[in-house]
Amino acid sequence: MVPAGRMQASDMLQDWVDDEKMLRHALAVEGVMRYCAEKDGKDPFTVRKWGLVGLLHDLDYQEYPQEHCRKSEEIMREAGYDEDFVRAVVSHGYPVYTDVKPETMLEKTLYAVDEMTEMITAAVLAQPGKNIEDTELPYIMEKFNDESFAVHVNRDVTRKASELIGWSVEQIAEVTLAGLKTVSYEAGLAGEDEEDE
Ligand SMILES: [Fe+2]
Ligand SMILES: [Fe+2]
């Protein structure tokens, strides 16, 4: 099976994840991956595939944090996902959870934007209005370089991703920020007022 439809993918995600923060992260990375594919002129099928890889990339993390990526591999194979799709999901855990190194552009893009999505999410939520529309690149870079901020974000992964994909850290931040702006509501980054409504 080629990646299943979005509805099936979303159902599968919700079978394994009910933590709101994690669901928002899944939707955030989906949006950024779609943005990157579109920006690169990919056809609609590929845009959808990149999005679904983003949506499902942390499928196993809530239930199996110790076996992150390895468990997803098992679940997705069983569900009939194509090998390249499974490999893309698994390789985002390199080198912390898996030794599968990102090789294709799909894999390298996920690798680059996943951790940066966490970074930008933390930075936006640290602002008074918690609105990504008010967030600009220099502020993100300032937070990225301040290693005492959002210590759970692994800057080394982004630096490694930068080498692999050939984009500077700033370029990774720029593209991720732009992609996140396309899904600000889904990602919970549209500001406090909107969220309360
Ligand atoms: Fe992950
Ligand atoms: Fe992630």
Image (spheres, rainbow, N blue to C red):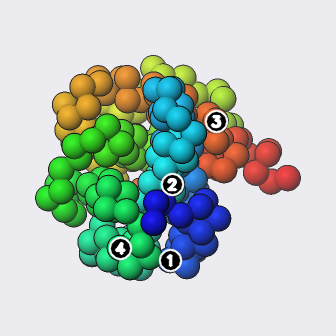
Residue nearest the observer in this picture, 53 or 46 = 46
Residue 146 coordinates in the image, percent (x, y): 33, 34
- The numbered mark, 4 or 3, whose residue comes first in the sequence reads 4
Which residue is disc 1 drawn over? 16
Residue 148 coordinates in the image, percent (x, y): 32, 42
- The numbered mark, 4 or 1, whose residue comes first in the sequence reads 1
Which residue is disc 4 drawn over? 77
Marks 1/3: CA–CA distance: 25 Å
Kindly identify the amino acid type of the residue bearing the numbered disc 1. Answer: Trp
Which residue is disc 2 drawn over? 52
Kindly identify the amino acid type of the residue bearing the numbered disc 3. Answer: Thr
Kindly identify the amino acid type of the residue bearing the numbered disc 2. Answer: Leu
Q: Nearer the viewer, mark 4 or mark 3?
A: 4
Q: Nearer the viewer, mark 1 or mark 2?
A: 2
Marks 1/2: CA–CA distance: 15 Å
Lateral position of residue 22 relative to residue 128, left or right: left
- The numbered mark, 2 or 3, whose residue comes first in the sequence reads 2
Please name the residue shown 36% across and 23% down the image: 170
Residue nearest the observer in this picture, 74 or 15 = 74
- The numbered mark, 2 or 4, whose residue comes first in the sequence reads 2
